[in-house]
């Protein structure tokens, strides 16, 4: 089973890239994990928010396979603590999908087509974070979930 974290646009801060790389490297010990950066749209100043979300959604949908399990990281998703998130990942790893894809939307969120295609939604917090910071938080939580599942001492109760 492969687990992937996808996002729209480049990460603009080196410290966030370094953090993502750290946890990505650690995750290789547990499963096949990779990140996918979907390029920012060009020339968007004349586009409305809905048009941007639609175009970003089209880029994502082109990359998804029919049997991918798509989980949106969305402010209106289900909130889980780290233990519940680890159980969630464990259950999804046993699904017949070849790939679990966690998707972080662009600055304006997701298109209706992405919401329709999604298999689920998770919220990392009731707080609002920049979509760039969420990249680091998400990969760390996936790593934390794997250490919980392996009964390793990273997570403390």
Image (tube, grey):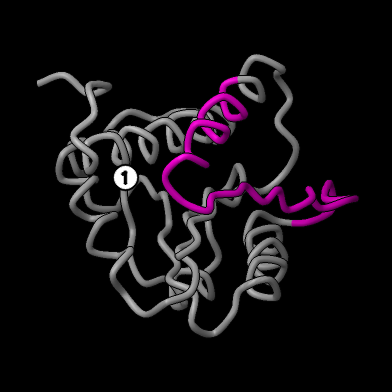
Q: In the image, 64: left or right of 126?
A: right
Image vertical order of residue 149 relative to residue 49, above or below = above
User: Which is more toward the observer, 143 or 74?
Assistant: 143
Q: Name the residue under label 1.
A: 123
Q: Where is residue 25 in the image (x, y as percent from the top left)?
A: 57, 32
Asked if residue 130 lies in the magenta stretch, the reply is no
The segment highlighted magenta reads 19-47
Please indicate whether residue 56 sits to the left or right of residue 155 in the image.
right
- Say whether residue 134 is visible: yes
At a point 49% along the width and 31% down the height, the residue shown is 26
Percent x, y for residue 130?
53, 29
Q: Residue furthest right?
A: 43
* Res. 109 visible in picture: no
Q: Which residue is drawn at 16% across and 39% down?
A: 83
Q: Is residue 20 magenta?
A: yes
Position of residue 41 in the picture relative to residue 5 (left or right): right
Residue in the foreground of this view, choosing between 46 and 35: 35
Numbered marks: total: 1
Task: Judge from the rendering whether residue 90 lies leftward or rightward of residue 117; answer left or right.
Answer: left
Q: Residues within 10 Å of mark 1 (few under 14, many from 20)?
A: some
Residue at screen point 9% across, 21% down: 157
Residue sitting nearer the eye, 7 or 32: 32
The quadrant in which residue 49 appears is bottom right
Q: In this view, does 55 lie above or below 116?
A: above
Q: The residue tagged with tag 1: helix, strand or loop?
A: strand
In the picture as drawn, the residue positioned furthest to the top comes out as 15
* Farthest bottom residue in view: 66
Whole-percent x, y for residue 52 in the image: 70, 58
Q: Relative to 99, is 141 above or below?
A: above
């Amino acid at each position: 089973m492969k687990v992937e974290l996808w996002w729209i646009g480049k990460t603009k801060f080196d410290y966030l890239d370094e953090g993502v790389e750290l946890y990505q490297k650690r995750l290789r010990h547990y499963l096949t994990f990779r990140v996918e950066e979907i390029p920012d749209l060009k020339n968007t100043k004349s586009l409305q928010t809905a048009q941007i979300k639609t175009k970003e959604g089209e880029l994502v949908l082109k990359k998804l396979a029919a049997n991918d399990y798509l989980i949106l990281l969305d402010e209106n998703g289900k909130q889980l603590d780290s233990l519940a998130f680890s159980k969630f990942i464990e259950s999804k790893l046993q699904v017949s999908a070849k790939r679990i894809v966690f998707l972080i939307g662009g600055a304006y969120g997701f298109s209706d087509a992405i919401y329709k295609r999604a298999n689920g939604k998770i919220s990392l917090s009731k707080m609002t974070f920049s979509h760039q910071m969420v990249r680091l938080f998400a990969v760390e939580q996936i790593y934390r979930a794997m250490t919980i599942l392996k009964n390793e001492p990273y997570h403390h109760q």
